[in-house]
Image (cartoon, rainbow, N blue to C red):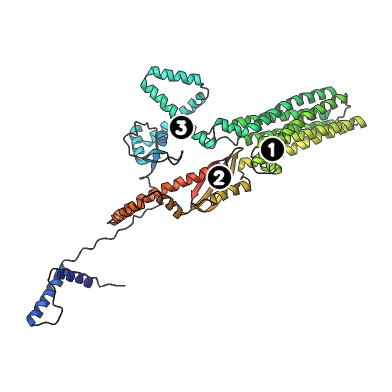
Amino acid sequence: ISYDLRALFNNQIWAAKSRHGAVPNCGYASSNVEGNSSKQTTTHATKDTEAQPKPVKPRWKPTIVDKNAKHTKNTQITVVRAMNDYLLTLEDLEDLRQITVRSAYASEFSSESIYWKSDVEKRAIAKWGSLENLDKEQRKVKDKLDDEERGRRAVTTQINQFSLVYCMIQGLSALMGHLKKQVKDQQKLNVDHKLFGSQEERMSHVRGSAKLVMYAIMSNVSVMCLKLLAYIWTGSASMLSEGIHSLADVANQCLLLYGIFYSLRQPSADHPYGFSRARYVYALISGVGIFCVGAGVNIYHGISLLMNPHQLESLSVAYSILAGSLLVEGATLKAAITQVRKNAAEASLTFKEYVLKGRDPNVVAVLLEDSIAVAGVSLAGICLALTSLTGNPLYDAAGSIAIGGMLGVMALFLIQRNGDALVGRSIPYNRLRQIVELMENDVMIRSIHDVKATELGADSVRFKAEINFDGREVSRSYVNNLDLEDLLIRIKEIKTVEELNEFVLHHGERIIDVLGVEVDRIEKNIKKASPEVRHVDLEIL
């Protein structure tokens, strides 16, 4: 639709003059003079209007942002990052601009100060001369911190107390520096405890498997000594195979125990997700050891006996030792079965499912090794009986080869199982479905997409999902904390587009803060319902 802006503007001028009494004659003219006067007035008004057009106010234009460009003007960083990445001190940051925001490492009620990255970079350049010099200094600091970390691990409480006394002697400044370091270390420790649990809490997750492995080590050491004595007494290949089998079990279970305690180490800068997968690494090495030492040596010895058979002696001693070994291995097997059932019940899995896909590789390894041990002892007894009845030592050699074959199959299963876990395996579907249902029942979430949950270790799971939030509910959560009557008054006071733009930007930023609070709440609900989930990554669609 096209408008005659000149005619509209003239009508506005006419209305203005009519309010001041200068109204043109709109009726029939009573005389020519009046008519001429009217024409002259109209003519002058038209000329004045053409000579002085009314200025048109420019329309408000939105700011166009290139989202592919690099924007660092409003980028902000925390105090810790300013000190770590730019090697600045608190004194260097004192006079810089800062604001207070919600902390990402604590509840929604706590806050922390952040600085503009551009200001921090300028201050770092002023202190170090250039960013290249800063990089060189960072490498020096990193090497120094690595050396200090290796030495600090050996420091005891008495040495810490001595250092405190030393600082007090040196002066107040040294004392303040020591206290700041202690506070910083404690804050980092609190964050690590929140994300990964304290040492006692982490130990509670593996106490059952650690006890089981230590019990298996002690039983296998005693059984190994008995079997090797039986071999020395009788010369039986089956008894030697069983002795080698027990020796391999002891070595492999020592690896499992070391992997358990290694996995309890706190996360570091090089390993931010911790060392939980160390159990899979050492369980994999254990499987390789069983395959090479246990299976390989037994099969080789059995083949050697087939090629060079000899008669056995003192079989009664061998029977007695086998009976004792069967009792010890059976007790360890029973303890392993009990622990696997307990872990399976906690993970909502069946016994078979936990053996195939359970997160704790240690109890599964002990279970399989003791199962093969009981089967091997039974097979060795049968082969010795056949050898004593028939006088043919080939049965004893066949028993050694059969035991080696069983160990080989078990070793391949452990290698495949732990290798699969190291690559990155999803948690069981029913557990994943429980987490998804918990999120779908939340009022703030419309839909969930691209869900992934992988095992980081026996007691750690990482969960990731893309979430479509309900914008109306997020906004309602923000509005519920406002005084709407006061907000309405503020809206009515808005007179210009610029004021409206500032008003929208202000409340838009507050809504984003509310969204962050809701994300933290959802993460806490997930970790509360599934304690094994230690890391939650929620991406907003």
Q: Is residue 291 visible?
A: no
Farthest-out residue, left: 33
- Near mark 1 (Cα within 10 A), the count class, few <14, some 14-19 or many ≥20, is many
| Mark 3 vs 1, N-terminal side | 3
| Mark 3 vs 2, N-terminal side | 3
| Mark 1 vs 2, N-terminal side | 1
Horizontal arrangement in the rendering, residue 177 relative to residue 394 (left or right): left
In the figure, residue 243 lies in which quadrant? top right
In the figure, residue 104 lies in which quadrant? top left
In the figure, residue 531 lies in which quadrant? top right
Instruction: Judge whether 482 appears above or below 192 on screen.
Output: below
Q: Nearer the viewer, mark 1 or mark 2?
A: 1
Mark 2 is on which residue type? Phe
Q: Find the distance from the CA under tag 1 to the CA under tag 2.
A: 25 Å
Q: Are marks 3 and 2 in contact (CB under 8 Å)?
A: no
Label 1 element class: helix
Residue under label 1, please give it. Answer: 340
In this view of the protein, which residue sits in the foreground, 405 or 27?
27
Q: Find the distance from the CA under tag 3 to the CA under tag 2.
A: 25 Å
Label 2 element class: strand
Return the x and y of residue 390 as percentages of the image width and height.
92, 32
Return the x and y of residue 483 as percentages of the image width and height.
36, 50
Return the x and y of residue 434 as percentages of the image width and height.
59, 48
In this view of the protein, which residue sits in the foreground, 316 or 334?
334
Mark 3 is on which residue type? Gln
Residue under label 3, please give it. Answer: 187
**Residue 463, numbered circle:** 2
Horizontal arrangement in the rendering, residue 208 relative to residue 393 (left or right): left
